[in-house]
Amino acid sequence: MADIRLEGVGHSYDGGRTWALKPMTWTWRSGRAYALLGPSGCGKTTLLNIISGLLTPTTGRIWFDDREVTTVPTAGRDIAQVFQFPVLYEEMSVYDNLAFPLRNRKYPKAEVDRRVRRVSGMLGLDDHLRRRSRRLDPGRQQIVSLGRGLVRSGVAAVLLDEPLTVVDPAMKWTLRSTLKEIHRDTGHTFIYVTHDQTEALTFADEVVVVKDGEIVQAGEPTELFLSPAHEFVGHFIGSPGMNVLPAEILDGLVRVGRAAVGRAVGDLPAGPVRIGIRPEFAVLDSAGSTPGVAGRVTGVDRMGSYDLVHVLVNGHDEPPPAERDGPPPTERTTGRTTGRTTGRSDQDGNAGHPLVVKTEAGSRFEPGDAGFVRFAADRAFLFRDAVRCGTVAPLNGRGEE
Ligand code: ATP
């Protein structure tokens, strides 16, 4: 096992015209479980293939501890890699497939048997060990591929590229915890590529979020949720993601429209910013009771264990008149969502910014209700050019004009 250090590593597939991976310096610390999380095409597989040696980076150097491996081929790196789709010998039995990486490296017979049975037990393959691999369904074949990646000892890292894509959804939960268990058991460095936040958050000690070929934030799952350093992290992690609204810093206060929502904290010049607040940390109150941003409910998603209340906030500090008895502000839909809008104005043409507030189930809000949205001060963040530049401290007293 080793720390894997990337120094200025970047990759371009088109001679430097565009960068699939922008030059980065980053260390994967030995023994940790990482998730590499990001949308399709952001460069996750490119990064993984550079670590494993399947791809030589256009720029930069790679070190395993103090050994430089930039030009060392895969076979010389002692990396185990599991791909999105099964890679195994179909004519071999499951046992022989699992044993193959060990026999190849001349492990003693008894050790091969011990390791194969241990991995097989953990992955639920005991009843299939004698079957030919081609007779298994694709999901089970993928589990065998996973086993082939996990069976060895002393690897520099185990790289998993969306390994559960073809696995039955019911099995995924079990396998995720199994993988965590195997990580704890072996102490190997795991780098698990996924675009699924649940997979990333449940598996990893540390989640590395990638966007457009660069790392925008890395941290423990809770840190990414509570303290996003980039608008993208706020949006990509969380369900639904963070609300982001245009705001302004004026005389040290953060204003959304005319309403002051808090004091700006940070070395921040006056001017436009964006304020981010997660649905969990926005509170909707009946009109007038507390300071906040005035708005009108445009829809309520009844999710069972909680409600998502959609509000069009207008940035004034007086709420628009309630319209519960009047015409609905947006089209009504059937099912659990009523009157939802994603636009920036309701059907009466009232301009505003859509925002989602998460409340407990059975909230009393209905489309057309007016209210004030308050932001939990230590959970609202300021962004410039999508990067966090400050936080918001509470106002003393009511937000003034
Ligand atoms: P996905 O989740 O869809 O696999 P990813 O995050 O793993 O995406 P990459 O596969 O690393 O992203 O791709 C990053 C960028 O590089 C994309 O724009 C992709 O089209 C491009 N790319 C990937 N492989 C090649 C290649 N062999 N030749 C040219 N461009 C490539």
Image (tube, grey):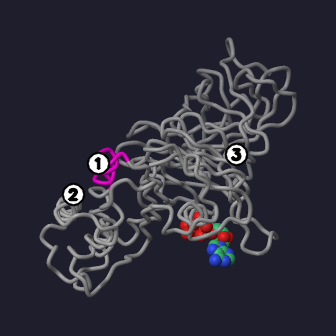
Q: Is residue 9 left or right of residue 76?
A: right
Mark 1 belongs to which amino acid? Glu
Q: Is 77 drawn above or below residue 65 in the view shown?
A: below
Q: Are marks 3 and 2 in contact (CB under 8 Å)?
A: no
Q: Is 82 drawn above or below residue 94 in the view shown?
A: above
Mark 3 belongs to which amino acid? His
Q: CA distance from mark 3 to mark 2?
A: 50 Å
Residue 245 visible in the shown view: yes
How crowded pointer 2 is (Cα within 10 Å; few <14, some 14-19, many 20+) is rated as: some
- Tell me which segment is drawn in magenta: 176-187
Q: CA distance from mark 3 to mark 1?
A: 45 Å
Secondary structure of the residue carrying tag 2 is helix
Furthest residue toward bottom: 91
Q: Are marks 1 and 2 in contact (CB under 8 Å)?
A: yes
How crowded pointer 3 is (Cα within 10 Å; few <14, some 14-19, many 20+) is rated as: some
Residue that carries the numbered disc 3 in the rendered image: 353
Residue 292 image-quadrant placement: top right
Residue that carries the numbered disc 1 in the rendered image: 181
Q: Main secondary structure of the magenta part?
A: helix
**Disc 3 versus disc 1: nearer the observer:** 1
Residue drawn at point x = 70 percent, y = 22 percent:
262
62, 340: nearer the viewer:
62
Residue drawn at point x = 69 percent, y = 61 percent:
21
Q: Are marks 3 and 1 in contact (CB under 8 Å)?
A: no
Looking at marks 1 and 2 on the same chain, the residue that comes earlier in the sequence is marked by 2
Residue 269 image-quadrant placement: top right
**Residue 164 at x, y = what percent?**
38, 65
Q: Is residue 188 left or right of residue 377?
A: left
Residue drawn at point x = 61 percent, y = 29 percent:
375
Residue that carries the numbered disc 2 in the rendered image: 122
